[in-house]
Amino acid sequence: MTHLNKKYPSIFTGDLYNQSALEVVKNILVSLKEGAFRATVNILKNMDQNELADSLQRDEGVCQFCEKLQHQLKQQTYFLPTITQGEKVQLQYMYTDTLMELLSDKNERLGYLEGVDQLLSQKGVFNDKAQVTFITGDAGTGKSILLQQSQSLWSKGELDTGARFLFAFSCRQFSAFQESDKISLWDLIFKHNYTCPDGDMRNNVVECILKNPEMAIFTFDGYDEINSNFDQGTDYEISSTEETAHPLVLLKSLLSGKLLNGSQKVVTARTGTEFLSMLVRKRVILKGFSIDQLQKYTDKYSHGNEDQKLVSVQINSNHLLQSLCLIPLFCWIVFESCSQSVEILKTLDHGVTLTSIFMVLVRAFFSRSNLNIYTEAGSWKLRAFAKLAHLGMEKEKFVLNYDHLYSCGIGEKDLKVGILIPASYYDNGKTATFQFMHLTLQSFLTALHLVLEEQMSTRGIVQFFPQLQSQHFLHLPWRGGSKSQTKSSSQTNEHHHYTNLFLCGLLSKQNNDLQEPLMSQPLLRKKQELLISFLSDNVKLNFRNLPLDKIDDGIAVRLTHDMLRMLRYIFETRSDKLAKLAAKGFSAQVIKLTYCKVDSVDCGVLAFVLQYQKEFYCINLDNNNISDYGIRQLKPLFSNLTTLRLCDNQIRDEGVAIFTNEFLKYKALKGLTLFTNQITDIGAKHIARIIEECPHFRRLALGNNRITGEGGRYLANAIQRSKAIYYVG
């Protein structure tokens, strides 16, 4: 109290009825341990300050609830998931920041967050009137773990937000409600997620939140998992916290600010999820690990564990595996799965694809239960889980009950495999419910069901593809019908995209050894032929007569994100026939893929297709996330490139050295644009060689890097000796 007297003298000099002084005392006491209120109340009563004492006594219940809330979140966020039963890994020892890029409402790049503590800061805010921080990213980029880390920091008082309350929800929770369910906001908070405070404590908590909504944070993880029938644009909303409505209406009203206006909201979703832009205060895109962050993560994982050190060595020696491991989920899968079995680790020596990574994960899950997926018992269980995954994906159900499990042949004993995890808290514990460990794993198993199921109609196999196919395909007589219709382009979501990607990988001839022990050869060949025919029709329809633009460098063709997806499907099949067919569509002098979210793995996709483009051309990959690993994947293309644009792509000196060595073999390069990367004097020395030794090199753009006077001298000397260069910027 002496400390308070010195710091806030007005409180103890007759101005105790000043409202701001009262709030100062409350805010100070909030940060103290339980019992601080009682001690302070007794002191104030002895000082005849009864009104302030009574006010603080009412707030004591709020403080106790906040402490319980912090304790609950601390327990929920303490550990990370693992495959090994009984083994637990603490979040604080393993969490590693990823690239968290800020975007404006006009998709302008605003830089990067330096850490989780800036998530709710003013940095990157472009709409002060809105209240939602919207976080997006591809599958596996760490959206859920980012929320877990922020919740963990808040529970320990290490997240500087000024918020006394943090209520964490998974959007899967809303799928568990029935259409007829109606609840109030307080029911949603207290009964369906957190222990409800009793009597006066509840009233005090409610009163505190209503008076100070800015002191409450709501996090909603996985907005893309809400049923697609939910229309965010509908007019029906509520503004009273006591009014009952369907939980999705509560969610919509919260996000719009009609309900509990002023509260802070954080929403995560997969790339491409529709969300009303007028509600967004701040946009963050997760882009996976940088090279340095990946190294930091692998060092943490392999510390003191010999098996995991072997995995780390494998990652560092395999460039394609490195590229995949820039996605945190895939890196976790590699470590968790391969450290269980040297045999599983060796399978990655023969070729790494996204499909093979997830097959490794499934084998590791079954292995820990002493099951082999290639034995009769293991195969039967695998098919059961795959059938369940398909059932959920087809009905857009991500929370499943025992009826769903039993209908697919999964019993209670099968839960020890670990592919399913409990989700009972989603429906307040009324019935036991389950979810797949990760939604991308559900996508993989769904694709596996499409491949293994003998009774699946030929059209049903491609049911999750967007409706891009030609009418010719739909009416071919040898293709059967199905009640499951293919999705229109606007309906296709990221879950279906990954299902399609895995389907292409599982039916790739390169992965025959994964499927042959599980199904008959004639059925496998039939499904492979069907898929290739389907994709071939799509490529002919969508890559023929691509729109062309006239620009300074010549005729340009611009690829969209949807076209890039189709190229990913082709790459996963490893079909040279499809790659050659797609390459015919790129008959232009410039190929543009700016702002297409191209990562290092996608560079392998582009190289697989564009290697069949034999004429010289320019490729523009500005504003993506390629990194040095991506440069390595692009090597097959450098022989035919005349201009390369790689602005803002996390390129470092190692990447510069790679393309320098390639360009000096062919000496056809005319232009290089590398604004806003991480190139130092070492990289400048490599580029100086290109200027000197490529006889047709004319244009160089290298601003906003990390080049000092030393690197500038390398470049200046090379420019003086060049007879062709005429532009440097």
Image (spheres, rainbow, N blue to C red):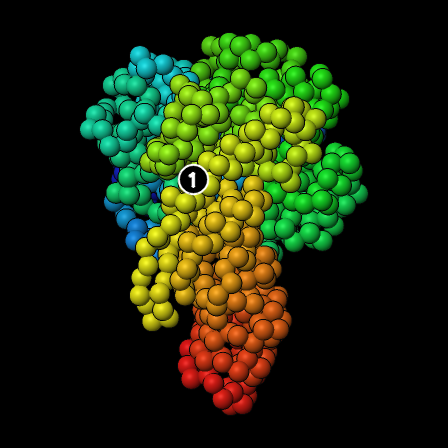
- Give the quadrant of residue 685: bottom right
Judged from the image, the secondary structure of the residue bearing numbered disc 1 is helix
Judge by depth and name the residue closer to the eye, 551 or 222.
Answer: 551
631 versus 499 height, above or below: below
Coordinates of residue 212 in the picture (x, y in percent): 31, 34
State the residue at coordinates (35%, 53%). Answer: 546
State the residue at coordinates (74%, 36%). Answer: 344
State the residue at coordinates (33%, 36%). Answer: 490
The residue sitting at the left extreme is 235
Coordinates of residue 329 in the picture (x, y in percent): 58, 40
81 versus 431 height, above or below: below
Classify mark 1: residues with Cα within 10 Å, few (<14), some (14-19) or many (20+): some
Looking at the image, can residue 478 be seen?
Answer: yes
The residue sitting at the front extreme is 477
Coordinates of residue 256 in the picture (x, y in percent): 26, 35
Judge by depth and name the residue closer to the eye, 275 or 73.
Answer: 275
Residue for badge 1: 537
Coordinates of residue 178 in the picture (x, y in percent): 36, 14
Looking at the image, can residue 59 be seen?
Answer: no
> Is residue 453 rendered to the left or right of residue 251?
right
> Which quadrant: the C terminus?
bottom left
- Give the quadrant of residue 292: bottom right
State the residue at coordinates (55%, 29%). Answer: 527
Specify the amino acid type for callout 1. Answer: Asp
